[in-house]
Image (cartoon, rainbow, N blue to C red):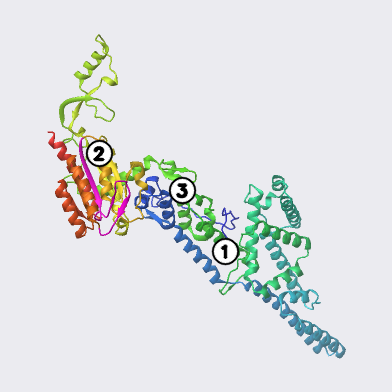
Amino acid sequence: MVLGKWRRRKQRGQRYAYSAWDGTQSGFDLSAHEIMAELNDDLLYHGDINAALRRMMQSGFDVDGERVQGLREMLEQLREARQDRLDQYDLGGVYDEVSEELKDVVDTERKSLDELAQQARESGDNRRQDITEEVVSDRNLQLDLMPPDLAGQVKSLQNYEFTSTEAREKFEELMDKLREQLMQQYVDQLSDGVENMSSEDMAAMKDMMAELNQMLEQREQGQEPDFEGFMDRHGQFFPENPQSLDELLEIMAQRMAAAQAMLNSMTPEQRQQLQQLQDQLMEDMDLQWQAQQLGQNLQNAFPNMNWGQQYQFEGQDPMGMGEAQGVFEDLADLDALEGMLKGTSNPGALAEVDIERARELLGDDAANSLERMSEVAQMLEDAGLIENREGRYELTPRAIRKIGQQALADLFRKLDQDRAGRHELERTGLGHEREYSTKPYEFGDPFNLHIERTVRNAIRRTGGGTPVRLLPEDFEVERTEHLVRSSTVLMLDLSLSMPMRENFLPAKKVAMALHALMTMQFPRDYLGIVGFSEVARPIEPHELPEVSWDFVYGTNMHHAFMLSRQMLAKQTGNKQIIMITDGEPTAHVDDRGNPHFSYPPTRETVDKTLAQVAAATREGIRINTFMLDADSALTYFIERLTELNGGRAFFTTPETLGDYVLVDFVEHRRKLLSARR
């Protein structure tokens, strides 16, 4: 039963245990940044924040040694909780208890009859003995001829003239208890707000059902029922405080569907016995009629609610009639929660779950996990990391920076602190040496103000005189070596072989890390990104987190080099291309821009690719290649490329790719800086 909302039920007999804080209890704090770190690899691999959230919701995650259960774990717990109840109880116990008590009534009566006959025999009065034996024989015959079904036995005993006062009192007590249980069963189907109903409560319930049936008929005729007036008169029956007629009807439909599931789970004989018992004991026929009418109206209003649900009980513990209603309510809630969890597409939808009811059904771990998971999306929104646009989440610029910083931190964490090439701009030394020349100040420059030239600029602007008033446009700062500009294009292989060989995630991490490194520490440097598979395309930095591989074959280095050269032609400074790939060139574009794929690669593809390498070499562009899982064909091609260009080639693995790329990039910049000294 998949519901739009998992309704709150009245919680009976709920108990909580509290203890004073002694410093040993552990809390469970969850931050948006921890969530983003958990999503990082999935985002980099698949490039879809919505899919990443769904997968995290399904599988769960760990934070500081605490486990947030995923929906798969919870669904398994739900199935186990349902099966535990089915394995524990015997539905036939609803009647076993009544049958045993009726048997006790009959045994008490037979014992009294035996005692009556014995007393007559011992009296010595033959006439008394004859009359008594005739009465005893007749009464025993009536008891012997009672029908085997409970309803028939109840009807027979209602018409039976008891000899035993004790047996009669037991029977009357049993009838009162059965009437109360059957009445409470009606009440439980219709309302969760009243227990131990008085005759006044019963009359109010009949009025409530009659008015509710009338409102359903009004709606069927296109009229607008007076819901607020109805709640003013009958709100005591609905502690859930429904806010609309639809919500009220759904609450009642859930209760009646649970009661119907109990009937569905009975054998035909058991259902017949229950109906006959109701007919025998329920004196208020108007109440039965109103309840039956309401049940039919609710089935018509909610045809998709699982009115045909039934359960197969295989346990040994007999359920009493009152206990059975509670068990079926639990089963209905387990089914409703399961349906909701299966239909949940984003964590925010879990906010509709009644956490305390989930705690009753599944325990603290699952309930706490549901609560934490429901907060995930809102926490990311509040932290400015995602935005909800037309029902879909999108990453914000802040999130993109965060992903890059996380990728950078992951890669640098693997490097030794003293390893050559470690690049920490906050340290003084190389990269901040004065160059003894100046330049106009631009936002982002270190504020090493050259006082003499700054004042001279102001005097020149104003024509002289005192006082000298400075404006930002007058500022002139001393050049330092880290102002040397480098322009880089990262060529990222997006062909299908990259994920197939598990190379895509580390390669994309490097792209994100390089972007973060240059944004934070080399803001004047240029980084362009080109993705290539069957064809190549530029990738904007804000698009990078959502970039995924292409479901096509082809490694079109020819087109990628062409686009990279075009991007670098617009830049200044030292220029380089960093290419990450796991395959030789297998595609090129013709003069019209049409792609051509062939494996093994054709001579035309190789020649066109090397022609682009030669053009890049003439333009002073250095090409450094990082080969993942290189085979002999790729190795041979890259050797020709590096021989032609003078760049370098690295044979690496997915595990060490980030180390090599970042160290080389930083070392390359250090060499540029050193050359200026």
User: Which residue shows up at 20% across the image and 22% down it?
Assistant: 450
Label 3 close to label 1 by CB (< 8 Å): no
Residue 391 falls left or right of residue 139 = left
Quarter of the image where one finds residue 328: bottom right
Residue 661 image offset from top left, x and y in percent: 22, 48
User: Which residue shows up at 19% across the image and 34% down it?
Assistant: 484
Any mark on residue 69, and which? none
User: Which residue shows up at 21% across the image and 16% down it?
Assistant: 456
Q: Which residue is mark 2?
A: 568
User: How dense is the environment of label 3, judged by Cα within 10 Å: few (below 14), some, or many (20 and up)?
Assistant: some
Nearer to us in this view, 137 or 328: 328
Residue range in magenta is 573-600
Q: Is residue 579 magenta?
A: yes
Q: Which residue is mark 3?
A: 375
User: How dense is the environment of label 2, judged by Cα within 10 Å: few (below 14), some, or many (20 and up)?
Assistant: many
Q: Which residue is mark 1?
A: 331
Q: Amino acid at mark 3?
A: Glu
The answer to whether residue 662 shows anywhere in this view is no
Outermost residue toward the right in this view = 127
Residue 121 image offset from top left, x and y in percent: 80, 89
Count of numbered badges drawn on the protein? 3
Give the CA distance from mark 2 to mark 3. 45 Å
User: How dense is the environment of label 1, judged by Cα within 10 Å: few (below 14), some, or many (20 and up)?
Assistant: many
Quarter of the image where one finds residue 635: bottom left
Q: Is residue 120 magenta?
A: no
